[in-house]
Amino acid sequence: MSFSKIVSLRVSLIVLVIAATSAPLAAEKKLPPPPPAHAKAPVPAVTDEYIHKEFGENCSLLGGPPQFVGDLDGDGVDDLIVAGRCKNPLADQAEYGFRVTDPYDSFLGFGDVKVTSTFASDVPDRKGVCLLIVHGVGPEAWRSDKPKPKFLLINLPFKTLSVKRLEMKKKTVLGIYMEEKDEGEATSSVLFWDGKKYRYQLLGADLE
């Protein structure tokens, strides 16, 4: 066999080896998951009867802010987001199986919810205001009678609420956007699920 044929054969062999090894690598490179569907309003709307069932008689709906349904935790099942007003939620969380969290004060460096739950607002209309979130389970999602992860978020200074897509480093999720009042007047922020808990992130101030 001539020298040129040997070289040509070796080159062909190298090309085949490179192609064989690069194909699995290309297959292993995962595409980012598709963005979640846009949030919508629950139909029919949630009533105090549902809130009492899931969070106890000390909680009720807060009139004004809209109600939302959307996949916050990325599991493909719709979750419920509503504004509420609750008295002494720590006393009811074990009975009704929800978790009291304070993403806002955790962001500010205060991590103990037993302490931050005592940070009551001086404004009567703001006392007990909270955000109620129910993660959906199975085909009936958040309306299911099965035990569901439930969260009661306290001390959030929201004036308005909206649920929209939030772009993260590796994927797009649904975030709970807030226009703030009181201490955070004229600023906006967002809450999002990080896989373990809800986190607060400041977005900035209005330019007006």
Image (tube, rainbow, N blue to C red):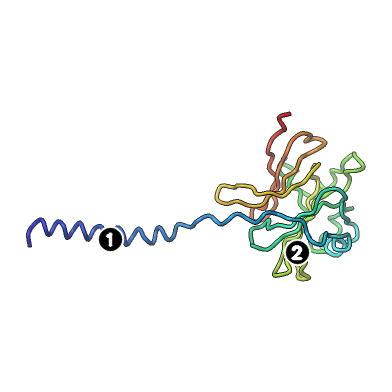
Q: Which residue is mark 1?
A: 17
Residue 129 in the figure: left or right of residue 175 = right
- Extreme-left residue of the structure: 2
The x, y position of residue 168, in whole percent, is: 59, 47
User: Visible in this render: residue 95?
Assistant: no
Work out whether residue 76 or residue 96 is closer to the camera in this orientation and state it.
76
Q: Earlier in the sequence, mark 2 or mark 1?
A: 1
Q: Residue 152, relative to residue 122: is it above or below?
A: below
Q: Which residue is mark 2?
A: 142
The answer to which quarter of the image holds residue 156 is top right
Amino acid on which the number 2 mark rests in the picture:
Trp
For the point 44% across and 60% down, the residue is: 28
- Extreme-right residue of the structure: 124
Quadrant housing the N terminus: bottom left
The answer to which quarter of the image holds residue 60 is bottom right
For the point 79% across and 61% down, the residue is: 43
